[in-house]
Image: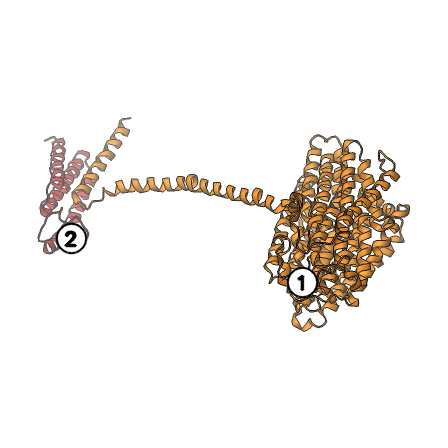
Chain colours: A orange, B red
Amino acid sequence: MENLIALLVAAPLLGAAVLLCGGRRLDAVGHWIGTALAAVSFVLGVVLFADMLGKSPENRTLMQHLFSWIPVEGFQANVGFQLDQLSMTFVLLITGVGSLIHLYSIGYMEHDERRRRFFGYLNLFLAAMLLLVVADNYLLLYVGWEGVGLASYLLIGFWQHKPSAATAAKKAFLVNRVGDMGLSIAIMLMFTTFGTFAFGPVFQATGALTSGADAPGSEGKLTAIGLMLLLAACGKSAQVPLQSWLGDAMEGPTPVSALIHAATMVTAGVYLIVRSGDIFNAAPDAQLAVTVVGAVTLLFGAIVGCAKDDIKKALAGSTMSQIGYMVLAAGLGPIGYAFAIMHLVTHGFFKAGLFLGAGSVMHGMNDEVDMRKYGGLRKYMPITFVTFGLGYLAIIGFPGLSGFFSKDKIIEAAFAKGGAEGWILGGAALLGAAITAFYMTRVMLMTFFGEERWRHAPTPSPAEPSVEPAAETRGAHAEPHPHESPKVMTIPMIVLAVGSVFAGAFFGIGERFVKWLEPVTGFEHGHPPVSALTVTLSTVAVMVVGVGFAYAQYGRRPVPVVAPRGSLLTRAARRDLLQDDFNHVVLVRGGEHLTRSLVYVDHTLVDGVVNGTAATMGGLSGRLRRLQNGFARSYAVSMFGGAAVLIAATLLMRAV
Amino acid sequence: MNPVNYLYLAALLFTIGATGVLIRRNAIVVFMCVELMLNACNLAFVAFSRMHGNLDGQIIAFFTMVVAAAEVVVGLAIIVSVFRARHSASVDDASLMKL
C-alpha cells in the first residue's frame, strides 16, 4: 500500500513531463492525457482511502521512506511520505476536484491553441500540491509549497500576452515569496531548536520542550516558529497582510481560479497550521495571532466582495473571507482544527462549483466579466443557474446545505473560546456570515435575475478604471448570445453542486468528520457561553438579514449598467480597501527611501573613505615624484645623505 | 710613519672628491672627482692592510682599480656620445631621458 503514495504524486508529475516536453505532436490528445493522469491519481487516492477505512483509527497512518535526499551528519533530509487522515482528506479533495476541473477545462480551453501546455501546468500543480500534503517533513513540504507557487505563477500568467495577466502573475509570485521566507525561517528555527524538521520528531520534541525542565525560553522559540508559520500561511492563503495578490490572480483562466485559487492551493496555509497544531498548541501567543488574522481577513474579504463588479473578483473576495474562517478556526486549537478542515472541504466543493459556474457564464457571454452587463441569464443557462444557485445556497449557509454545517461549527467554536476574545471573534464571524449572504445574493441577483442588461451593450464603459480594465480587451464588442455550456463543462459543475449540497450533512451529522480527523488533530468540545442552538439560530437570522438587504438593493430596483459613484467605503472596497495603495505607500515608497538613504551613505561614507585613501596616496606620491627630477647631482646628494645616515646609524648602534 | 695619517689623507681626498661630484657641472670633472673618491678608498684599504698586517685590503684595492678602469671606459664613452648629441658636457643639461 505504501508504494501507492509515491505513485499518487508520480502520476501527475509524469503527465506534466510528457505534456510539457512532448511538443506539438501531443496537441490533439494532450488534454485527455492530463485528465486521465489526474483521474489515475484520484483512483489511487480512493484505493488508499478504502484501505485506510479498513484499519482501526489509531493505525491508519502510512509511512514510507523513499530515499535520503541530503544526508549530512546532523542534517538528515529525507524524501518520505506520511499519509494520515488529514493528508488523506486533502488527497481526495485535490485529486477529486482536480480531476473534475481537468474535465471542465477540456471544454473551457477548447479554443485556446496552447491547451496542451495548460494541462501540463495543471498536472504540475497537482503533483506539487500532492507532494505538499503527503510529505513527512517540513523540508519536503517546502518543495511542494514552492512547486504550487510556481504552478500558480505559470497559470495566472497563462495568457501572458495580456500585460495585466503577466503583472498579476508576478505580483502573486512576489507576495508569495514573502510568505515563503516565513516558512524557510520557521524550518531553520525548527532545525536549530530541535535538530530535525520531520513532523513526528518535531512534534514529540515540542511536547518534551513544554513539559520538560528546560521550559524557560522554549515558549518564546515556539512562538517565533508559530509566527513564521503563520506568515507562510498568510502568503499562500491570501490572509491579511499578504492578501493583495488573490484579486489580481483572477486574471488567470477560470478553471485555474477554481482549482488553485479557491479549492486547493490557497488552503495550503490552513493545512500548514493544522499540521503544525502541536506547535501552535504550545504557543498561545502565536495562536492568538492566527485567530486575529483569520477574523480580520474574513471581514476584509467579505467587504471587498461586496463592492466588486467583476464576478471573479467578487468570488475572490469571498474565497479570502472563507479562508479567513478556516484560519480563525485553526487558531482556536483542538476545538477548531477539525472544523477548519471540514469547512475547507465543503468550501472546496461549493467555491469550485461557483467558479466553474462563473466560467460557464463568461464562456456564454464572450468572456465578459462585469456583472453589471449580465442579468436575466437564468433562462439561457439553466444548468449553470441551478448549479451556481446550489453553490450559492451552500456558501451563505442555508440550513441543510454544506456551508451551514461547517460555518456554523466555526462560529460556535469561536464563541467557545471564552471571555472577551470569544465574543469578539464570534461576533466577527457572525458579522462575516451576514456580509457573505449579502454579497453572494448580490452576485446571484446581478447575474441571473433582473433585466437583460447585455442586450444594449453600451459603448466602452466609463466605469472606474479599477473595476475591470481588461474586460474590453477580451474582445466583447458585439452583443453576446448567452448559451449553455457543453456537457464536458456542465457535468463537473453538477458533481460539485451535489457535493455542495450533501457534503456538509454527510460530514456534520453525528460528527463523522471530527471522529475521522481526531487521531491526527485531536479534538475537544467547546462550550460556548450561549447554547449551540442560539448560535445556529442567530447565524440563520443574520444570513436572512444579509439576503434581505441585498434583495432590497439589487432585486427590487434595476441595477445600473454603469457603476454609481458610491459611498466612500464602496469606493475604497472597489480598490480592495486600499491594499495596493497601502503597499505602495508603506512598502514601495518606504523601500525607495531606504535604498536612497543607503545610496547616500554609500556615496558619502563608503566612497568617501575609499576616495580619501586614494587621494592621500596620490598627494604623497606627487610629493615623492619631485625627488626624481633627472639631475644627476641631486641623486648624488640623496645617495651621500643616505650613506651618511646609514653610517651614523651603524656607529650609533655600535656605541650603544 | 704612523699609518693613521694615511687614513686622514684618504678621508680628505674622499671629501674633496665628493664635494667635486656635488658642485661641479662638467661631466669630465665630475668623473675625475669620482676617480678621486675611488682612489681615496684604495688608499684607505691599503692603509688598513698595513695596520692589520694582512693582504686583504691590497687585494681589494686591485679589484677597485680593475673596476675603475672598466668604468672609465664605459663612462667616457657615454660622456663623448652625450657631448656629440648636445654639444655640452654639463650633467645638468642631461636631466631628461630624451633630447
- Disc number for residue B74: 2
- Dot 1: within a 10 Å radius of its alpha carbon, few (fewer than 14), some, or many (20 or more) residues? some
Q: Amino acid at mark 2?
A: Val
Q: Quadrant for the C terminus of chain A, please.
A: top left
| Circles 1, 2 touching at the beta carbon (< 8 Å) | no
Q: Amino acid at mark 1?
A: Ala
Q: Is residue A638 left or right of residue B33?
A: right
**Would you place residue A219 above or below residue A188 in this image?**
above
Of residues B22 and A567, the one nearer the viewer is A567
Q: CA distance from mark 1 to mark 2?
A: 107 Å
For label 1, the residue is: A457
Task: Write the residue at 23% across / 37% down.
Answer: A642
Residue at mark 2: chain: B
Residue farthest right in this picture: A510
Task: Write the residue at 31% across / 42% down.
Answer: A618
Q: Is residue A200 visible?
A: no
Residue A24: give x, y in percent of width and height.
65, 72
Residue farthest top in this picture: A656
